[in-house]
Every structure is written in structure tokens, then in C-alpha cells.
Image: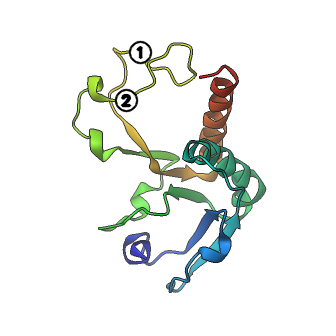
Amino acid sequence: ETAEKHFMVGHRVHYYVFTDQPAAVPRVALGTGRQLSVLGVRAYKRWQDVSMRRMEMISDFCERRFLSEVDYLVCADVDMEFRDHVGVEILTPLFGTLHPAFYGSSREAFTYERRPQSQAYIPKDEGDFYYMGAFFGGSVQEVQRLTKACHQAMMVDQANGI
């Protein structure tokens, strides 16, 4: 609901809601030029699996559907609350959002992956920012490339017991 008040107001928007409970998605009054599609996805018991498979789902839907339907994709957690204007100025080839809990913190405070055997490894003397996964996007091609790479790296880590 807050997206309707603050997100890309005055522009065409197609909301895609990924859920394992399509019937539970509430009806939201949408403005002119805005539509909502509910996309059923597999249920996972553990939140860790939901989080890990999210990248796979986004990548797959980019290839199967989004490339032919939209130019840009903005991925947001369903519980994201918009409090101010978010407009087309964010529509770059690829963007991320700094994690508010780590904003202004030094790299020592970041909860980066520090195990060298992990695909996500970041050495202690590297990394200037900490991004959140709850709000990112860009062109569909770049989002697909990013989410595919993230998913593949997570699968390597999982296969290696990490």
C-alpha cells in the first residue's frame, strides 16, 4: 500500500508478488497504469531456504517472463515500507541499497562472509559498504545476471557444506 503512495508515482508499474500462498495476497487499490500479478512459487520450511532460493526465482522469472514484459525490475521485500518518494532516478543498469543498520559503520562492523572457502568471501581489509537484499534492481538483463550469479555461488557453497 505504501508503494502506491510513494513508488514511481505517475509511471506505469507492474507489481509481481512471489508467494507460496497466492490466495492470501490482499487486494490493493491500484492507480492508473499500475497492475499486480501474483506468481506462485514453491514453499520452503526454513526462512534460510526461502532467502537462498529467492535469487533463483528472480533469475528464472527474468528469463521466462520479465525480459518480455518490462524494462526495469525493482526487487523489494513484501514488507518494505515506503515513507517518501522513490522515482525513476533509481533506474540505472544496476542499483543496490545500503543497509540502514550498518549505515555509517566501519567495515569491522559489517557481517560479511569471512570464511575464505566461501564464494561470498570478503577479506577483513576490503569492503566499504554493506548492502541489504531487501531493495535492489536495475535493467532486467542486469538483475538476471546478478541473481543468477548469486544463486550459482550459493549453490557452490551449499554443495561444499558452507
Q: Nearer the viewer, residue 147 or 139?
A: 147
What residue is rendered at 32% in x and 27% in y? Answer: 128
Instruction: Give coordinates of residue 32: x percent, y percent.
Output: 52, 86
Q: Position of residue 23 (x, y in %)?
A: 66, 76
| Picture residue at 49% right of the left edge, 75% below the top | 11
- Which label sits in the foreground, 2 or 1? 2
Q: Which of these two is toward me, 63 or 90?
A: 63
Q: Residue at x 56, y 14 (%)?
A: 117
Seen in the picture, residue 26 relative to 142 is either above or below; the reply is below
Report the side of 12 relative to 114 (left or right): right
Q: Residues within 10 Å of mark 2 (few under 14, many from 20)?
A: few
Please indicate whether residue 78 sits to the left or right of residue 50 in the image.
left
Q: Amino acid at mark 2?
A: Thr
Q: Residue 34's x, y, as percent?
A: 55, 79
Q: Is residue 85 above or below residue 104?
A: below
Q: Residue at x 40, y 65 (%)?
A: 87
Say which residue label 1 marks.
123
Q: Quadrant of residue 162?
A: top right
Which residue position holds label 2? 111
Figure check: 126 above or below 82: above
Task: State which tag comes first along the sequence, 2 or 1.
Answer: 2
- Of helix, strand and loop, which one carries label 1? loop
Quadrant where the N terminus is found in the figure: bottom left
Asked if residue 1 is positioned above or below residue 74 in the image, the reply reads below
Label 1: how many residues lie within 10 Å, few (<14), some (14-19) or many (20+)?
Answer: few
Alpha carbon of mark 2 to alpha carbon of mark 1: how far? 12 Å
The disc label shown at residue 107, or none: none
